[in-house]
Image (cartoon, rainbow, N blue to C red):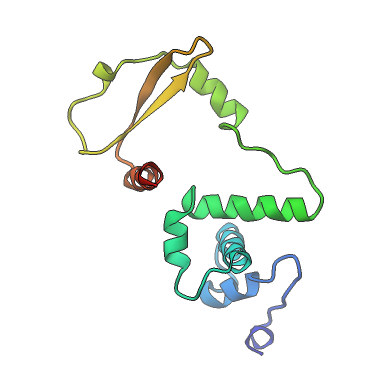
Amino acid sequence: DLVAENGLTVQDRAPMTPVVKLVFGADYDKTRLTEYAAVLSHAHRSGIERGGLTRFLRQAEGGLKGVVQAERRLRREEAGKPAEAADGPREALARKLREMEPRGFGDIAPEGSEFGLVMIRRLESGEIVVLGEVPDDVSLVERAARRLLG
C-alpha cells in the first residue's frame, strides 16, 4: 500500500490528506494540504469524473476557496453542528464597507483593463451607490463573468 509505505495513515475525518501528501510531500504547507484534501473530498462527494476537477473548480462559486468552504459546511452539517448561512460578507468586513463614502461612476479612472469590477451597496432607502472599482484582478473578473454569463 503506497500510503503505508510512505509512513502515512488514512483517517476517517480526512481521508484525502494522504493522497495530497503523496503528491506535494508531507512537509508541504499544512494549510494548503488541508484545503487540497477538502477539495478532493468534495469532488469525490460530488461525483466529479476523472479529469473533471479543473472544470469543476473553474465553474464553482468562489473557485477553490469556495469549494473548500462548501466541503467544510457539509462536514459541519454531517457532524450535527450548525452551518452558518452566508447571506453577506463577514460582519467586520461589512462594517468597513458601510463606512466607505459612496462614489459615482465618474470617480472610476478611465484608464485600465477593458473589463473590471465595481462594488455597489444597496441602501435601506432602495438607493444603489457605487463603492469603488476592484482593479487588476483577472481571476476575480473571470469568476464574476462566469456567474454573469450563467
Instruction: Looking at the picture, tell me which residue is in the foreground, 129 or 107.
Output: 129
Residue 12 percent coordinates (x, y): 76, 70
Q: How many marks?
A: 0
Instruction: Looking at the picture, tell me which residue is in the foreground, 104 or 95.
Output: 104
Q: Is residue 24 above or below residue 126?
A: below
* Residue 132 appears left or right of 65: left
Residue extending farthest to the top is 125
Residue at 45% x, 17% y is 100
Residue extending farthest to the left is 111
* Residue 82 appears left or right of 51: right
Residue 18 percent coordinates (x, y): 64, 74
Instruction: Looking at the picture, tell me which residue is in the foreground, 23 or 83.
Output: 83
> Residue 130 lies in what quarter of the image?
top left
Residue 147 percent coordinates (x, y): 41, 44
Residue at 36% x, 24% y is 132
Residue 113 percent coordinates (x, y): 21, 38
> Residue 71 lies in what quarter of the image?
bottom right
Residue extending farthest to the front is 150
Residue at 69% x, 71% y is 15
